[in-house]
């Protein structure tokens, strides 16, 4: 009886020693400057598609030699796909006249529209800028709204290569993207 309990204690002690000393950083929610009136009642933000390097927990900075290297001791607090999807949904919900939620749509009646964001560049450049690029597709769920596909390329100043600066630049870039998406469906 004592052996299984002792094994459990040893296993728990071993696992507690595995925890790193990484600081965790949230994908920031930087609100839009003003609320935009949009031509849709409800909007679903589909799960954002990220390139493999940006989908990892590491906060990366591209150095002068072109290599993407993790910022030591810093990780994203949430899965980047989830964090970015939730940030876009929250900003669109607060910054537009539509009811907005991330997928899966929580209400019985489906949304009027969905937006699919595909990010193909998400890079903090050590030389001082943050780049966010890709495309978003506006999908009509009712068949009455116009569907379209738009590319975006956003650059924000990067105040440093520390994780706080990278997170702040990402927050500003997502706000710019949210404003572009909202503007594309404005009345």
Image: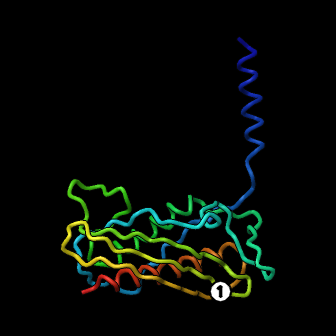
Residue 58 in which image quadrant: bottom right
Q: Is residue 40 left or right of residue 13?
A: left
Q: Is residue 60 above or below residue 125?
A: above
Residue nearest the viewer, comparing 21 with 183: 183
Q: Position of residue 98 (x, y in %)?
A: 27, 73
Q: Is residue 2 above or below residue 129?
A: above
Furthest toward the top, the residue is: 1
Q: Position of residue 153 (x, y in %)?
A: 52, 85
Q: Which residue is mark 1?
A: 129
Q: Position of residue 106 (x, y in %)?
A: 30, 55
Residue drawn 59% across the image and 80% down it: 169
Q: Position of residue 57 (x, y in %)?
A: 64, 60
Q: Is residue 40 above or below residue 10?
A: below
Residue drawn 73% across the image and 82% down it: 126
Q: Callout 1 environment at 10 Å: few (<14), some (14 to 19), or many (20+)? A: some
Which quadrant would the C terminus be assigned to in this image? bottom left
Residue drawn 42% across the image and 79% down it: 178
Q: Is residue 30 left or right of residue 65?
A: left
Residue nearest the viewer, comparing 132 with 76: 132
Which quadrant would the N terminus be assigned to in this image? top right
Residue 103 in which image quadrant: bottom left
Q: Tell me, what colour scheme is on the image? A: rainbow
- Is disc 1 placed on a helix, strand or loop? strand
Figure label count: 1
């Amino acid at each position: 009886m004592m052996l299984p309990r002792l094994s459990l204690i040893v296993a728990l002690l071993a696992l507690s020693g595995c925890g790193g000393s990484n600081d965790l950083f949230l994908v920031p929610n930087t609100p839009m400057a003003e609320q935009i009136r949009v031509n849709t009642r409800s909007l679903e933000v589909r799960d954002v598609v990220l390139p493999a390097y940006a989908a990892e927990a590491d906060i990366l900075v591209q150095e002068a030699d072109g290599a993407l290297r993790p910022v030591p001791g810093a990780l994203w607090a949430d899965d980047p796909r989830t964090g970015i999807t939730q940030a876009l949904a929250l900003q669109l919900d607060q910054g537009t006249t539509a009811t907005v939620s991330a997928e899966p749509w929580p209400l019985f009646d489906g949304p009027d529209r969905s937006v699919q964001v595909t990010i193909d560049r998400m890079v903090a450049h050590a030389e001082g800028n943050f780049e966010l690029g890709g495309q978003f597709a506006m999908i009509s769920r009712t068949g009455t709204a116009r569907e379209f596909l738009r590319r975006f390329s956003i650059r924000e100043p990067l105040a440093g290569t520390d994780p706080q600066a990278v997170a702040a630049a990402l927050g500003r870039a997502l706000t710019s993207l949210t404003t572009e998406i909202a503007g594309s469906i404005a009345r």
